Image: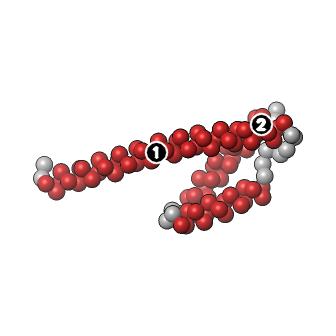
Amino acid sequence: MTDVVSKAAEVLAEHRNSIDRLDAILVYTLGERFKHTQAVGKLKATHDLPPSDPAREAAQIARLEDLANRADLDPEFAKKFLNFIIAEVIQHHKSHQT
């Protein structure tokens, strides 16, 4: 390999290692987040509260959009991501109410 190709391969490997570490952080963070949302779902079911809270969801989306802008992340992607998570959480909450 030429020196330039060898250096490019080294930089690529470094980026991939960083991506792998960040993927692990994301998965463990989501796991921790869902532990808390499961507890919220059980609490809501125990106290006969609705599984969704539109005001909270709207506030969370606005907060995440602001965070995304500050992190230089596409806010539309961030909103889609949070909407996906919220939908999953609501499904979990509903499962506790039956």
Q: Earlier in the sequence, mark 1 or mark 2?
A: 1
66 shown above or below 95? below
Is residue 93 at all visible to an observer of this figure? no
The residue lying toward the viewer, choosing from 36 and 81, is 36
Report the Cα–Cα distance between label 1 and label 2: 28 Å
Secondary structure under badge 2?
helix
The residue lying toward the viewer, choosing from 55 and 21, is 21
State the residue lying farthest toward the left: 2
The disc at residue 42 is 2
Label 2 environment density (alpha carbons within 10 Å; few <14, some 14–19, many ≥20): many
Residue at x-position 66% and y-position 59% = 61
Q: Position of residue 22 (x, y in %)?
A: 45, 47
State the residue lying farthest toward the right: 48
Residue 34 as seen in the image, left or right of residue 13: right
The disc at residue 23 is 1
Q: Position of residue 58 (x, y in %)?
A: 72, 60
Q: Quadrant location of residue 93? A: top right
